[in-house]
C-alpha cells in the first residue's frame, strides 16, 4: 500500500531536524562552548548522519513502548536529538554534550537521563546485549512473570565495521542454540570504518552468515528515487553500474559531487542512448541526490522494510547508507572524526533555513505546522507511555542461608551445597535465582542445583540417558520452567547474559537473581563484557572457581594471579574470597540483598573460590561476626596488648597462616591473625572514610579496617599472604603506617602438589615465618614446618 503522504512528509521533516540537531550539538561542543583545554570532543557528525533517517523511522513511527534499542555509539547525538524532540532530553545537556554532567558521548543507562535502554561503546557489546535480552524476555515469559505485558523487540543499531567484533559472532551461535526471537539488528552499511573503506562484497558474507543462523535478512539498498530511475528507459544499466561500482569509488564520488558522478557514468557506460538520456535529464545536484538516495536514507524505503516484518523471527536489516550524507564531508574516507568548519556550518545553517540564535528551537527551519508536528510526536507509539524503565519489588532473603556442614570442605563445594539447600525449598529467593555457566556447570559445583531446578528451554527435552535407564549422577531435564541456562565455552557470552539477566527488573518488570560460574582465570577472557555489565549497573553474582595456584596439578592454563586485583579495581562489583564455608554462606546471603539495593548502595558480587579442601571451624555465627565478614575482615585470633606481629591472610591459604601463627607463637606473644574475606570491601571502606573526613573536616569516621588495626602500635609488623598477586593485600600497611611483608603469586605455570607450589612461590607456612622474622625485633622463631 505504501506510506501515507502526510505521514511521510512529517517523518522526513523530523529526520532532517534530527540531522541538524545532532550535527549542531557536536559543532556547539567544539566551536561555541568555551573549551579551555583546547581539546576537540570528537566528531561523529558523519556517523550520526548515516543513521539519522533510520533512527527517525524507528523512534517516530515503528518502535513500541515495550521495544528496547541499543544505539550505535557514534550515533549518540542522534539519539539525544530524538529524545530532545520527544521532551525527554534537556537543552542544557545537549549544549553540554560530552561535558561534565552533559549528554554522554556514547549512550549510557547510568549517566544519561533520557531513557537509554542499553549502554553502548565502540566494542559491539551493546549489539550482543540485545540478543541476550531477548532470551531473558523468553525466560521471564515462560515463568509467567510478564504480567500481561506484551513482548518487546530487542533492536541493535550497528555499524558494518563494528561487525568485526568477535563477541557478536559468539552471541549469534548462542542465539541459534536457544531459538532466538524478537530481535532486530540494523546494520548501517556505509562501507567505511575508522581507518578505511570496508572490503567489497561484505554484505554477501553478512547475508550468508545470518541466514545460516536462522535469521531473516532484509537488504534495503535503493531509495525511491533510485527505484523510479531504474523504471525509466535505461534504468537497468544504471542499476548495474551502481551494483558494480567499488565501495571506495562510490564513496569518493559522493564526496566529489554530481559532476564527478556524471563523468564516471559517461566514461564507464558510454553513449548508450536511453541511459545517457536518463543521466542528461538531471542536473548535477539532481544526479547527486539520485546517487545518494540509498535505502538507508530514504524514509519510505525504511518504513516499508520495518513494517513488512510480521513475525517474531530474528531479522538482520542491511541498510545501505553514505557516511556523512548531506554534509560537506560525505563519503570522504577521513570523515570519521571530521568536523564541519564554522564557515561550512554557517552555510549549511542558511541552507536549512535556521535563523542565527534559533539553532536549538525544536521545529526551526521546518515548513510544517508546529502544532501538527507536536501532535505527531505525542502520538508516536514509542512515546505514548513516556519513560519506559520498569521496576520490581525486592525478593526477601533469609537471615541465614543453610548448608550441610562437613569437617573438611572447599569453598567451591560449599557454594554448591548452599545452592542445593535453596533448590530443595520453595522460597521466593529460590524461584528467582537463575544460573548460567559456559559448559562448566558440573566442574563448578552447580550440578546439584540443576538436578533439582532443571535447565531452561522453551520446549521440553527429556534426559535420554535417564529414559534409557543409564546410571548418571545428573538427571537434567530441559523445560520452560528450568532455572539454569547452559552456554557454550565463551566467557563473553556468560557476562553479557548475566548483564541481560541482571537488568530484567528494569527491562521486563520481573526481578531475577542471576548466578554465573566459570573458572577464575577465565574472568580475563570476558573482562570487557564484565566491565560493560557493571558500567550499566546490571546486578548478578559470579562464582569464579577454581582459583590461584591451589589447583596445583592443572598448571598455568588454569591458574590465576591478578583476579583479586580485578575484583578490587572493578567498579560496581563487590569482591570476596572466603576461606571457610560458613563465611561463604554469610557472604552469599548478603550478596543476594546487595544485588537488589538501589544506586551506589548495591551492585554485583564476585566470589573467588577454591577446590582446596581445608578443615572447617566449629563456631557460632554471631551477628557481629556476620557483619565483620561482609565488611571484609575479622580477627580469627585477636592481637594481645603487646602485639608486634600480625598475620593477615585471604582465602585458601588459611591453613598456612594458622600454622605459621602457631609456630611463631612459641617465641612471640600476642600475635594477631586477621582473616580478610574481602580486600575489595576493606579498601572501599577505607577510601570512603578518607573522602568523608576530607570533605567534612572534623568528622572522625573510621572505616572497618581502621578500627580493626587501631589497637596495634606503630612498631607492629604485618605479613600478608594470598594465593594471588601480593598487591591485593600489600596496601594494608598504609592504613596506619605499619611495615608490611606482602606474600603472594607473581609468576605462574608450575605444576605439582599444593605443598610443592606453595613452597616454590613462597606462600607456605615457612615463608610466612621467614617474612615475620624480617619484620620482628624479637627472638627468632625456633621451629619450622617439616617438608613433606
Image: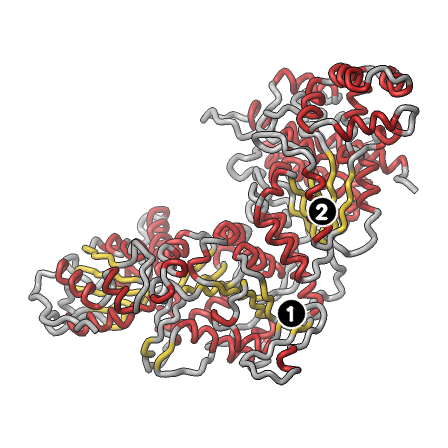
Residue at the image point whose x is 66% and y is 61% from the top = 177
Measure the C-alpha gap from mark 1 to mark 2. 29 Å
Quadrant containing the N terminus is top right
Check the picture and name the quadrant holding the C terminus.
bottom left
Horizontally, is 645 left or right of 596 in the view? left
- Can residue 360 be seen by looking at this rendering? no
The front one of 328 and 623 is 328
Nearer-the-camera pick, 608 or 260: 260
The crowd level at tag 1 (other Cα within 10 Å; few <14, some 14-19, many 20+) is many
Q: Secondary structure at mark 1?
A: strand
Q: Residues within 10 Å of mark 2 (few under 14, many from 20)?
A: few
User: Which numbered mark, 1 or 2, is in the foreground of this view?
Assistant: 2
Give the residue at the far left of this rendering: 779
Say left or right for 308 vs 257. Answer: right
Camera-side residue: 1 or 109? 1
Q: Return the disc, 1 or 2, that comes first in the chain's sequence.
A: 2
State the SS at label 2. helix
Q: Is residue 266 above or below residue 445?
A: above
Q: Say whether marks 1 and 2 touch (CB < 8 Å).
A: no
Point out residue 744 in the picture as x, y percentages from the top left corner: 28, 58
Q: Is residue 481 above or below residue 274?
A: below
Looking at the image, which residue is at 76% across and 32% down? Answer: 297
Going 86% across and 38% down the picture, which residue do you hit?
7
Residue 128 position within the rendered picture, expressed as x and y whole percent measured from the top left: 62, 51
Q: Which residue is mark 2?
A: 208
Residue 456 image label: 1
Q: Position of residue 647 (x, y in %)?
A: 22, 65
Amino acid at each position: 500500500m505504501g506510506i501515507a503522504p502526510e505521514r511521510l512528509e512529517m517523518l522526513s521533516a523530523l529526520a532532517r531536524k534530527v540531522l541538524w540537531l545532532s550535527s549542531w550539538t557536536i559543532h556547539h561542543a567544539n566551536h561555541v562552548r568555551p573549551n579551555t583545554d583546547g581539546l576537540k570532543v570528537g566528531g561523529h557528525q558523519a556517523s550520526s548522519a548515516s543513521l539519522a533517517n533510520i533512527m527517525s523511522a524507528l523512534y517516530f513511527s515503528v518502535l513500541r513502548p515495550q521495544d528496547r534499542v541499543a544505539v550505535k555509539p557514534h550515533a549518540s547525538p542522534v539519539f539525544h536529538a530524538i529524545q530532545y524532540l520527544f521532551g525527554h532530553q534537556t537543552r542544557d545537556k545537549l549544549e553540554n554534550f560530552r561535558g561534565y554532567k552533559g549528554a554522554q558521548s556514547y549512550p549510557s543507562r547510568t549517566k544519561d537521563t533520557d531513557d537509554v535502554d542499553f549502554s553502548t561503546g565502540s566494542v559491539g557489546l551493546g549489539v550482543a546485549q540485545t540478543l541476550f535480552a531477548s532470551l531473558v524476555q523468553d525466560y521471564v515469559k515462560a515463568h509467567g512473570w510478564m504480567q500481561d505485558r506484551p513482548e518487546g523487540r530487542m533492536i541493535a543499531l550497528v555499524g558494518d565495521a563494528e561487525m568485526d567484533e568477535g563477541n557478536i559472532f559468539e552471541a549469534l551461535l548462542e542465539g541459534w542454540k536457544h531459538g532466538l526471537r524478537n530481535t532486530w539488528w540494523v546494520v548501517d552499511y556505509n562501507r567505511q570504518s575508522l581507518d578505511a573503506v570496508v572490503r567489497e562484497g561484505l554484505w554477501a558474507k553478512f547475508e550468508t552468515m545470518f541466514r545460516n543462523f536462522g535469521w531473516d535478512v532484509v537488504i534495503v539498498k535503493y531509495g525511491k528515487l533510485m527505484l523510479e530511475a531504474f523504471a525509466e528507459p535505461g534504468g537497468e544499466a544504471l542499476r548495474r553500474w551502481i551494483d558494480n561500482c567499488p565501495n571506495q569509488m562510490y564513496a569518493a564520488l559522493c564526496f566529489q559531487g554530481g559532476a564527478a558522478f556524471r563523468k564516471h557514468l559517461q566514461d564507464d557506460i558510454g553513449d548508450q542512448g536511453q541511459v545517457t538520456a536518463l543521466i542528461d535529464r538531471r542536473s548535477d545536484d539532481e544526479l547527486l541526490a539520485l546517487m545518494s538516495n540509498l535505502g538507508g536514507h530514504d524514509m519510505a524505503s525504511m518504513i516499508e522494510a520495518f513494517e513488512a516484518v510480521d513475525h517474531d523471527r530474528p531479522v538482520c536489516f542491511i541498510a545501505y547508507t553514505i557516511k556523512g550524507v548531506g554534509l560537506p564531508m560525505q563519503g570522504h574516507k577521513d570523515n570519521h572524526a571530521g568536523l564541519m568548519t564554522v564557515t561550512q556550518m554557517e552555510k549549511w545553517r542558511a541552507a536549512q533555513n535556521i535563523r542565527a540564535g534559533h539553532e536549538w528551537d525544536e521545529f526551526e527551519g521546518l515548513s510544517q505546522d508546529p502544532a501538527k508536528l507536536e501532535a505527531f510526536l505525542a502520538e508516536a507509539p514509542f512515546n505514548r507511555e513516556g519513560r519506559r524503565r520498569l521496576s520490581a519489588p525486592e525478593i526477601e532473603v533469609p537471615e541465614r542461608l543453610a548448608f550441610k556442614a562437613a569437617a573438611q570442605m572447599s569453598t567451591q563445594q560449599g557454594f554448591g551445597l548452599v545452592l542445593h539447600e535453596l533448590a530443595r525449598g520453595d522460597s521466593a529467593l529460590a524461584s528467582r535465582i537463575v544460573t548460567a555457566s559456559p559448559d562448566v556447570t558440573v566442574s563448578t559445583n552447580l550440578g546439584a542445583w540443576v538436578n533439582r531446578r532443571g535447565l531452561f528451554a522453551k520446549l521440553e527435552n527429556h534426559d535420554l540417558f535417564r529414559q534409557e535407564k543409564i546410571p548418571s549422577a545428573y538427571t537434567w531435564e530441559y523445560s520452560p520452567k528450568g532455572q539454569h541456562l547452559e552456554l557454550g565455552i565463551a566467557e563473553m557470552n556468560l557476562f553479557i547474559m548475566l548483564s541481560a539477566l541482571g537488568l530484567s527488573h528494569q527491562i521486563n518488570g520481573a526481578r531475577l537473581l542471576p548466578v554465573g560460574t566459570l573458572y577464575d582465570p577465565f574472568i580475563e577472557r570476558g573482562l570487557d563484557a564484565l566491565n560493560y555489565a557493571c558500567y550499566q549497573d546490571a546486578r548478578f553474582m559470579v562464582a569464579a572457581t577454581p582459583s590461584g595456584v591451589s589447583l596445583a596439578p592443572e598448571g598455568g592454563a588454569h591458574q590465576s594471579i591478578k583476579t583479586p586485583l580485578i575484583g578490587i579495581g572493578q567498579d560496581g562489583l563487590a569482591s570476596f574470597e572466603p576461606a571457610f564455608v560458613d563465611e561463604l554462606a554469610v557472604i552469599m546471603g548478603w550478596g543476594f540483598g546487595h544485588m537488589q539495593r538501589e544506586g551506589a548502595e548495591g551492585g554485583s558480587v564476585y566470589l573467588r573460590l577454591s577446590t582446596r579442601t581445608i578443615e572447617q571451624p566449629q563456631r557460632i555465627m554471631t551477628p557481629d561476626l556476620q557483619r565483620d565478614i561482609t565488611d571484609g575482615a575479622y580477627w580469627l585470633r585477636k592481637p594481645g596488648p603487646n602485639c608486634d606481629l600480625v598475620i593477615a591472610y585471604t582465602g585458601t591459604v588459611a591453613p598456612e597462616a594458622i600454622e605459621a601463627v602457631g609456630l611463631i607463637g612459641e617465641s612471640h606473644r600476642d600475635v594477631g591473625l586477621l582473616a580478610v574475606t574481602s580486600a575489595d570491601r576493606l579498601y572501599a571502606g577505607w577510601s570512603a572514610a578518607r573522602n568523608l573526613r576530607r570533605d567534612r573536616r572534623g568528622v572522625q569516621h573510621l572505616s572497618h579496617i581502621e578500627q580493626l588495626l587501631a589497637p596495634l602500635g606503630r612498631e607492629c609488623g604485618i605479613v600478608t599472604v594470598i594465593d594471588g598477586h601480593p598487591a591485593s593485600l600489600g596496601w594494608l600497611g598504609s592504613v596506619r603506617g605499619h611495615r608490611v611483608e606482602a606474600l603472594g603469586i607473581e609468576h605462574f605455570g608450575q605444576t605439582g602438589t599444593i605443598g610443592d607450589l606453595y613452597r616454590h612461590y613462597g606462600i607456605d607456612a615457612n615463608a610466612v615465618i621467614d617474612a615475620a622474622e624480617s619484620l620482628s625485633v624479637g627472638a627468632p622463631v625456633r621451629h619450622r614446618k617439616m617438608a613433606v
